[in-house]
Image (cartoon, rainbow, N blue to C red):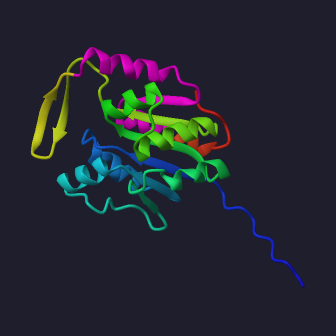
Amino acid sequence: MNEITRLPAPPRLAWALTGSGHYIKETLDLMARLAPLDVFLSRAAEEVMRMYRRRDGNFPPGTRLFRDRAASAPQIGRFYFGEYHTLVVGPATSNTVAKCVQGISDTLPTNAFAQAGKCRVPCIVFACDTAPEMMTEAPHGMVPVYPRRIDLENVDRLRGFEATTVVETVPELESALKARLECPTTSSS
C-alpha cells in the first residue's frame, strides 16, 4: 500500500489580543492584512472588541480563532509542535505585561507568552502603558492616561526578556512584524 506523506504546514503567526482598547482599531486593521494567522482572544479582548464595535475583528480568511474558554488552555500546545514562527501580544494591557514579567500564565495571552518563551518562539509585545502621560482612544473619544511607575517599570523589565521585542507604536509594530515575516526563522532581539 502506498503511503501519502504529508508535509508539515509552514509555521504561522500567532497573535494574542488582551483587554486593551489602546490602538485596538489600528491593530485589528493591521491583522486584517496578515495571513496565515491564529488569534488567541482573552475574554477581556472579546469585551473590548464589542465596545469598539469590532466584534468580528475582520480577520483574514483562514484565520483560526481560539477563545479563552478552558482552564488548561489546550490550544497553547500548538507552540510545542512548531506551528508558530512568531507570537505578537498586543495591544497588551498593563495587567498582561505585569503577569508576563512575573511568569503568571492564567489567561490565554499570558499562557501563549509563557509557552512561546519555553518553545523559543520569538515574541513581539505591543505594550500600552509606555509613557508617564499619554492619550488613548476610549470607545467614545480620546482620554488622557497616566501610567503608574510600576507599569512603566514592568515594560522596561519585559524589554530584557530573551527573544522578546517590545514596541510602543503602531509603526514600530509594523516594522517589527515586517522583519519577522521577512525572515521568520531567525530570533528576535
Q: Within the magenta stretch, is there residue 151?
A: yes
Residue 5 picture location, percent across and down: 80, 71
Residue 79 picture location, percent across and down: 60, 48
* Residue that lies at the very extreme toward the left in this rendered image: 140
Q: Which residues are magenta?
A: 147-176
The number of numbered badges drawn on the structure is 0
| Picture residue at 35% right of the left edge, 49% below the top | 42
Which is the main secondary structure of the residues drawn in magenta? Answer: helix
Residue 13 picture location, percent across and down: 53, 50
* Residue that lies at the very extreme toward the bottom in this rendered image: 1
In the image, is residue 58 above or below residue 143? below
Task: In this rendered view, identify the residue nearer to me: 79 or 33.
Answer: 79
Q: Is residue 70 left or right of residue 146?
A: right
Q: Residue 33 sits in which quadrant?
A: bottom left
Residue 45: in sight, yes or no? Answer: yes
In the image, is residue 149 above or below residue 52? above
Q: Within the magenta stretch, is there residue 95?
A: no
* Residue that lies at the very extreme toward the front in this rendered image: 71
Task: In this rendered view, identify the residue nearer to me: 160 or 181.
Answer: 160
Q: Is residue 26 left or right of residue 82?
A: left
Q: Quadrant of the C terminus?
A: top right
In the image, is residue 97 above or below residue 177? above
| Picture residue at 23% right of the left edge, 22% below the top | 147
Residue 179: in sight, yes or no? Answer: no
Residue 132 picture location, percent across and down: 24, 17
Q: Quadrant of the N terminus?
A: bottom right
* Residue that lies at the very extreme toward the right in this rendered image: 1
| Picture residue at 39% right of the left edge, 61% below the top | 59
Q: Is residue 147 left or right of residue 139?
A: right
